Amino acid sequence: APVSSMASCSKLCSSRTVDARKRVCHRFLALAVLSLLSLHHPADRSFVQNALRKNTQNPHGFQARKATATKVEDDVGYNLLFENALEEFANRSMTTKGAFPEYVKGDFVIPSIGQFDMGDRKFVGFLDCFGKMQRFRIDGTRVDATYRMMETKFFNNSVQARTISNGLLFFETDPPRENPWFLGPINNMPPFAPNDNTYVNTIKVGKDMLSLTDSYTMMVVDPESMRVTGTKVFEDDLEGLVCYTGSAHPLRNPKTGEWLDFVGNADLLSETTSVTCFALADASPNTRRKISDVVMDTAPYMHSFGVTENYMVLPRMPVKFSAQEVATKPMAAAFQEVGLTEAGPGNAFHLVPLNGSSGFIRTLPVDDPLWYVHTVNSYENATGIIIDLTTTAQNPFASDLTLAAARNKRIRDQGATGGKNLVRRYVLPWDTAAAITSEVLSDPHAATDFPTINSNYKSQKHCFYWAVEWFAESDSYASMAIVKHDVCSGAEKRSWSRKGWYPSEATMVASDRDGAAEDEGVLLFTALDGSTDQTFLIGLDAKTMEVIAEVGPFPRIAFTTHGAFYPSQDSEA
């Protein structure tokens, strides 16, 4: 195996620049060490399978199965969010009912899951499935829709193999994939696998549209055709030997306009991790400028974070990501809960100054674990830092993230797929002797997540947030709504819902009128009509939550992630 590894390393490096060759070879050798370690875990040998035999799988299984609408009590068509949605087309034009205002002229882009199987194999975890992009080009009473599967290397390799190819997954496929005996699950890690199924979010940096997930890998997407054109290559050295994470939710620096994010570099032989915070400017889209390194005792996982006028706010959950576990098992096993015995940096907010100076940590009590998913907003005031998060009652990775659970009404309604997420405000006093306080800002009888605010109020005090709500009008998880909360006056929440309709995350497009109120704008989202198996694009008045424009039907979009609106001047750039 070592001889084979060295030969492969030589082949991999032959066509790269000197620096790139060094980084790839070093990473390859580090993974080779992990590969050797994985062969010495007898309990994990079930994950090390011989893939050298000839593939005799019947190619007739290549065609993905069609979705079927099934009535599940009052959750009519909800399961269609977790079935194949394979249709692709470009610029299908439709006329709206109502009209979008002039400031909502541009592209609404929302990624989703598109395909749940390939050939004879099925995905087990719904977050693992092949990604898809949808773009709605909005102009008054006309909307042109484009649907495109993400032709990533992972997807293309799978198409070529006529089955789900190698790559990191939360859960192993059914039936399990086969790996070369000398690599085992290392075969699913770079450089052996692309790991580029980055369908969670999109941003624009310079002229590039990038698709992201919680990884250091970003893919370039052509905003016109919505095709993936390649992997984003950065001309810097921020990625170490075992670079394993990033955030799918970069935020703008409120002073400079730069994108802010981080990459996590784990140590090969210990649990120590360096979280490298960086800035990425539109003027220099290929070079990430390092702000600071935050050293943590164990490898964190942070899906989102906050940005204030002067700080990046990194919420550290008591979870560690184990590179050793990834070397021997599917990725779900790598998210290990850290047992808390005393207050410390493993359950805390890490404050990183944007000017690169030394940061500080605000810890939470042992009996208040920081389980969270998304950031609503964060800002500073005279007394401290405020950060609003969507929180869970338990480790979010302890939830059942399988397709079987998502498709099962009884399991959904019991909360096993995520429970009732609450929006919680944390106040971090400047006085380090003062304790952190928190309060709930959402309906405790419902689950609230996928939040959005007026982008003009990011990193400053806001009064309104909008979000998706589950258990909205009944004890059914699939009872969904788009809700508006006023956290300043405490006014009763407003909502939009239709029985048997399942909305995506909403994107708030703020009014461009001088002196416009904070809640003056349009909420854009897609919604699946479960009874007809069709998707519609809807625009709500963000103030009143009444429909101002609606267009459809379009072919069904499956489970969606995070949408973004790009004004026409950005779309045409």
Image (cartoon, rainbow, N blue to C red):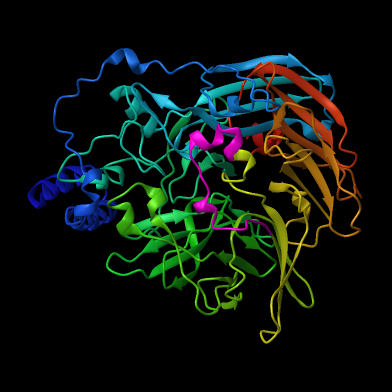
- In terms of depth relative to the viewer, which is nearer, 540 or 558? 558
Q: Is residue 101 left or right of residue 110?
A: right
Q: Is residue 264 visible?
A: yes
131 shown above or below 71? below
Q: Is residue 166 left or right of residue 529?
A: left
Q: Quadrant of residue 130?
A: top left
60 shown above or below 168? above
- In terms of depth relative to the viewer, which is nearer, 293 or 222? 293
Question: Which residue lies most toward the bottom here?
Answer: 433
- Residue 188: x %, y % from top left: 30, 43
Q: Is residue 305 left or right of residue 123?
A: right
- In terms of depth relative to the viewer, which is nearer, 359 or 354? 359
Residue in view at x 23 percent, y 44 percent: 46
Question: Which residue lies most toward the top here?
Answer: 60
Q: Quadrant of residue 142?
A: top right
- Residue 286: x %, y % from top left: 47, 50
Q: Is residue 561 visible?
A: no
514 shown above or below 95? below
Check the picture and name the quadrant holding the C terminus: top right
Q: How many marks?
A: 0
- Residue 303: x %, y % from top left: 54, 54
- Residue 316: x %, y % from top left: 54, 66
Q: Which residues are magenta?
A: 389-411
Residue in view at x 55 percent, y 73 percent: 356
Residue in view at x 72 percent, y 33 percent: 525
Residue in view at x 66 percent, y 70 percent: 310
Instruction: Say whether residue 37 is magenta.
Output: no
Q: Is residue 50 left or right of residue 459?
A: left
